[in-house]
């Protein structure tokens, strides 16, 4: 599956355009992180793009989120490593993340939302104008983007062995590289 095929599949299955943009943002971050682990950037990017494929079907049944997408992806022949990472990203008790790609997806997911929120409150409202220090300051404001689980994001240190500020920098730069697709 190519990046464009993955985005097309997402556009067919996900009704919320902002969620599609989120999935593209996660894909770009995953692509950048793949290099840290000497792994296939295309595979990591596809994992990020596809991670919320089942959102419309599971938004009212969170315990099935990721699991239903795994089943759909396997049915259409997507690589098991990608499908398994999608299944593990919500960190359900029966399918916890267990390798760097799975942990990266779990940890990147809330951070992209925090970066979008930081961009929208930045005076220029343009992600190209946002820097890592600005995001770090927002990260430390507990009430800002309260839905972005800071403890989950901080797992980058113990699970990926990347310091928080560096992790934020990697994800921010990745999102800046696809800013046109994100509308930011």
Image (cartoon, rainbow, N blue to C red):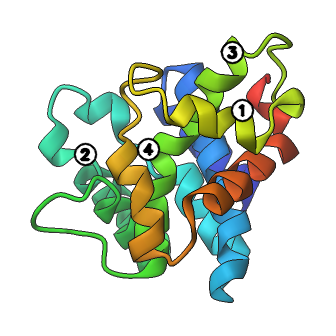
Q: Name the residue under label 3.
A: 120
Percent coordinates x, y for residue 129 in the rendering: 88, 28
Asked whether the beta carbons under mark 2 and mark 1 sit within 8 Å of each other, the answer is no
Please tell me whether mark 1 sits on a helix, a strand or a loop: helix
Q: Which residue is drawn at 17% across and 46% down?
A: 64
Q: Mark 1 points at which residue?
A: 134
Nearer to us in this view, 99 or 125: 125
Nearer to us in this view, 10 or 27: 27
Asked whether the beta carbons under mark 3 and mark 4 sit within 8 Å of each other, the answer is no
- Work out how far the residue at label 2 is from the one at label 1, CA to CA, in angstroms: 32 Å
Residue 92 picture quarter: bottom left
Nearer to us in this view, 69 or 122: 122
Please tell me whether mark 2 sits on a helix, a strand or a loop: loop
Q: Mark 4 points at which residue?
A: 53
Q: Residue at x 72, y 53 (%)?
A: 169
Residue 135 picture quarter: top right
Please tell me whether mark 4 sits on a helix, a strand or a loop: loop
Q: How crowded is mark 4: few (under 14 residues within 10 Å), some or many (20 or more)?
A: many
- Work out how far the residue at label 4 is from the one at label 2, CA to CA, in angstroms: 9 Å
Q: Is residue 53 left or right of residue 179?
A: left
Q: How crowded is mark 2: few (under 14 residues within 10 Å), some or many (20 or more)?
A: many
Residue 182 picture quarter: top right
Residue 126: mark: none
Q: Residue extending furthest bottom?
A: 38
Closer to us: mark 2 or mark 3? 3
Q: Which residue is drawn at 62% across and 60% down?
A: 167
Q: Earlier in the sequence, mark 4 or mark 1?
A: 4
Q: Mark 2 points at which residue?
A: 65
Q: Which residue is drawn at 63% across and 27% down?
A: 116
């Amino acid at each position: 599956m190519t990046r464009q095929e993955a985005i097309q599949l997402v556009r067919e299955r996900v009704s919320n355009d902002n969620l599609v943009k989120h999935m593209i943002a996660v894909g770009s971050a995953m692509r950048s992180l793949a290099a840290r682990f000497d792994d296939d950037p295309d595979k990591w990017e596809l994992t990020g793009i596809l991670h919320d494929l089942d959102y419309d079907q599971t938004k009212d049944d969170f315990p099935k989120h990721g699991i239903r997408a795994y089943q759909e992806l396997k049915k259409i022949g997507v690589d098991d490593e990608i499908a398994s990472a999608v299944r593990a990203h919500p960190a359900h008790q029966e399918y916890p993340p267990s390798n760097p790609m799975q942990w990266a997806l779990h940890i990147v997911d809330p951070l992209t939302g925090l970066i979008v929120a930081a961009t929208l409150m930045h005076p220029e409202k343009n992600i190209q104008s946002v820097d890592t220090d600005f995001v770090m300051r927002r990260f430390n404001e507990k009430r800002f983007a309260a839905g972005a689980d800071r403890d989950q994001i901080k797992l980058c240190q113990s699970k990926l062995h990347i310091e928080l500020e560096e992790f934020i920098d990697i994800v921010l730069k990745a999102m800046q590289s696809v800013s046109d697709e994100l509308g930011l």
